[in-house]
């Protein structure tokens, strides 16, 4: 059975994260979403690690399960850390790195050392004023199967290739530790097809996870493994880019991401890369510098055309959150009571969210869902929809069902749902 894994999440101890992000809630949401292996998040934080030790117990190799629970969901020890340091050219760099660890013992050793690097109790995503290569070197000394993955590698802030504090290559960042960077996380604003336009990344795997800051965001991106339920087998599949072990990734449509295009949110200005260059990177409204987004950064580093495809590349599927699909098809706002009620009803009728998006048959969709919702899910699968691109922290806006199409259904019919 394929394993759906979302290994980049946060706990309630991280800044700008929902207080509901407890281990029990991670488990509950993983079941709702259809995730088989969920990251613990924030294992460097003393209070969260205490909860991990008290609430979880060893299961399959390198994995944990909730004590006194019959759930099939497993936990994998994970965290994200921030490194702020100066490059050889004396420029300040800021990157986030996702860490995966195989055992409680290895995490204890990691935490003991990192407590000397920074204040672990201040943030679930601790900040270290140490070079990123030092982090990778140290982790290798603790356990050979600890994996360091540059997180959301293209976003403007705090990422490997980010336009504001990032690098132009892996080697610039990790120097002699580069051979031990086996994967990058695509992030919400890019997908493997975009990444593969950059030849220097041919040797690394693309993985995708949610970076969830609230329970509802779990599973919005994920990686599907064909391995045994075993930490070491999953890491080996990533390192070797094994198509039998690393089956595919689930990627939120990149245009939906908050930093896909360039722009200036304060002025409501969104620009394509070509338009940004034409305007010399200045906002047409206020003349300040725009935030350069992911599409622009990839174009800057790309040496292959947009339609280039690597024949042996690990495949991916494009998805959108079911909540967004419901909001669009019902003509309501995400977070509204109508959308929440319909979401719960569909999960009860058809099963986990990812199953609804990817697997439920057309006939079952049409039986259980509002006609426009079924139409929207099928449009997603057939890539027959549009998205107004996100920019400078503003989410993109999917359009699965047009306003004209919604008018076919009378208001009483809509109110039934």
Image (cartoon, helix red, strand yellow):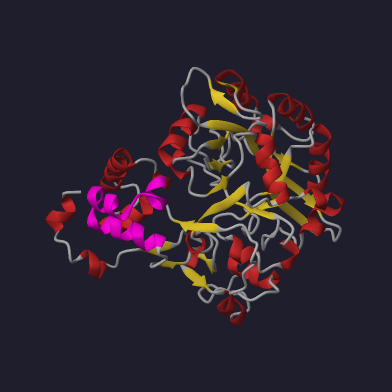
Answer with left or right where residue 385 lies relative to residue 277.
left
Magenta stretch: includes residue 373: yes
Q: Main secondary structure of the magenta part?
A: helix
Q: Which residues are magenta?
A: 355-381
Q: Is residue 97 visible?
A: no
Magenta stretch: includes residue 156: no
**Residue at position x 46%, y 58% from top?**
395
In the rendering, at what x and y percent does residue 374 appear? 29, 56
Vertical relation: 24 (above or below) 262: above
In the rendering, at what x and y percent does residue 232 appear? 69, 36
Q: Is residue 310 visible?
A: yes
**Residue at position x 65%, y 55% from top?**
153
Q: Nearer the viewer, residue 103 or 13?
A: 103
Answer with left or right where residue 302 lies relative to residue 212.
right
In the rendering, at what x and y percent does residue 249 appear? 56, 52
Q: Quadrant of residue 277?
A: bottom right
Vertical relation: 128 (above or below) 206: above
Please tell me how many numbered marks the rendered image carries.
0
**Residue at position x 69%, y 60% from top?**
161
Q: Nearer the viewer, residue 216 or 373?
A: 373
In the rendering, at what x and y percent does residue 300 appear? 68, 72
């Amino acid at each position: 059975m394929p394993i759906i894994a979302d290994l980049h999440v946060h706990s309630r101890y991280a800044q700008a994260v929902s207080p509901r992000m407890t281990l029990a809630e991670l488990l509950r949401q993983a079941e709702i979403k259809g995730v088989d292996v969920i990251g613990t998040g924030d294992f460097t934080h003393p209070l969260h690690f205490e909860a991990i030790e008290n609430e979880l117990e060893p299961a399959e190799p390198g994995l944990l399960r909730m004590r006194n629970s019959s759930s099939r969901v497993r936990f994998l020890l994970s965290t994200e850390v921030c490194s702020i340091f100066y490059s050889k050219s004396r420029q300040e760099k800021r990157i986030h790195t996702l860490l995966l660890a195989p055992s409680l013992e290895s995490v204890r050793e990691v935490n003991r050392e990192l407590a000397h690097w920074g204040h672990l109790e201040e943030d679930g995503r601790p900040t270290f004023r140490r070079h990123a290569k030092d982090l990778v070197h140290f982790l290798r000394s603790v356990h050979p199967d600890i994996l360091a993955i540059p997180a959301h590698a293209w976003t403007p802030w705090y990422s490997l290739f980010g336009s504001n504090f990032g690098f132009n290559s892996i080697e610039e960042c990790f120097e002699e530790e580069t051979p031990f960077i086996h994967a990058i996380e695509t992030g919400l604003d890019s997908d493997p097809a975009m990444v593969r336009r950059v030849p220097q990344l041919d040797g690394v795997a693309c993985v995708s996870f949610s970076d969830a800051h609230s329970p509802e965001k779990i599973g919005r991106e994920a990686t599907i493994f064909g391995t045994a339920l075993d930490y070491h087998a999953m890491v080996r599949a990533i390192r070797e880019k094994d198509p039998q072990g690393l089956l595919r990734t689930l990627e939120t449509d990149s245009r939906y991401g908050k930093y896909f295009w360039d722009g200036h949110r304060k002025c409501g200005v969104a620009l394509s890369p070509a338009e940004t260059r034409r305007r010399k990177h200045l906002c047409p409204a206020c003349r300040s510098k725009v935030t350069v987004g992911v599409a622009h950064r990839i174009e800057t580093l790309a040496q292959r055309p947009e339609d280039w495809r690597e024949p042996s590349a690990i495949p991916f599927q494009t998805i959108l959150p079911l909540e967004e699909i419901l909001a669009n098809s019902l003509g309501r706002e995400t977070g509204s009571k109508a959308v929440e009620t319909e979401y719960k009803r569909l999960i009860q009728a058809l099963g986990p969210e990812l199953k609804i998006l990817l697997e439920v048959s057309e006939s079952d969709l049409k039986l259980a869902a509002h006609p426009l919702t079924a139409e929207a899910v099928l449009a997603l699968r057939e890539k027959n929809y549009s998205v107004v691109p996100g920019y400078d922290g503003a989410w993109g806006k999917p359009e699965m069902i047009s306003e004209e199409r919604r008018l076919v259904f009378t208001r009483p019919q809509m109110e039934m749902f």
